[in-house]
Amino acid sequence: HALAARLTRAAPLAARATKEVAARGRYLPWAEAVRFGETMRRVAAATDDATEGWTAARERRPPKWQGR
């Protein structure tokens, strides 16, 4: 239950990217899977939600995810 609660509070775009990497990565050769994972990490890190996550952590408040 604790893990499920934590996942529901996660940034929706980051969670979607993680699921995509898990789903596609299992069919790719190791090096391609790592490359794909890094690409998705960079995409997720460039979102407004990523900035909100860092800002919220710095301000010690819960993040307000926008899905952007």
Image (tube, rainbow, N blue to C red):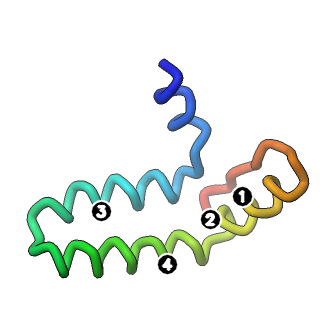
Mark 2 and mark 1: Cα distance apart in space? 12 Å
Residue 7 coordinates in the image, percent (x, y): 51, 37
In percent of the image, x 57 and y 45: which residue is there? Answer: 10
Q: Do the residues labelled 2 and 4 touch (CB within 8 Å)?
A: no
How many C-alpha atoms fall within 10 Å of the one at disc 1: few (<14), some, or many (≥20)? some
Task: Name the N-terminal-most of marks 1 and 4.
Answer: 4
Toward the right, the furthest residue is 59
- Density class for disc 3 (Cα within 10 Å; few <14, some 14-19, many ≥20) is some
| Discs 3, 2 touching: Cβ within 8 Å | no
Q: Which residue is drawn at 39% across and 77% down?
A: 38
Q: Earlier in the sequence, mark 2 or mark 4?
A: 4
**Circle 4 residue:** 42
Q: What residue type is labelled 2?
A: Arg
Q: Disc 2 vs disc 4: which is toward the camera?
A: 4
Which residue is located at x 90 percent, y 54 percent? 59
> What residue is rendered at 21% in x and 55% in y?
23
Name the kind of residue labelled 4 in the image.
Answer: Arg
Cα gap from disc 1 to disc 3, whole angstroms: 21 Å
Kindly indicate whether the residue at mark 3 contacts the one at mark 1 (C-beta within 8 angstroms).
no
Choose between 66 and 29: the one closer to the eye: 29
Residue 23 circle label: none
Whole-number angstrom distance, CA of label 3 to CA of label 2? 19 Å
User: How far is mark 4 from mark 3, CA to CA?
Assistant: 12 Å
The location of residue 25, given as percent across then percent down, is: 20, 64
Dot 1 corresponds to which residue? 53
- Against 42, is 64 above or below? above
In the rendered structure, find residue 21 and report the number of the disc placed on it: 3
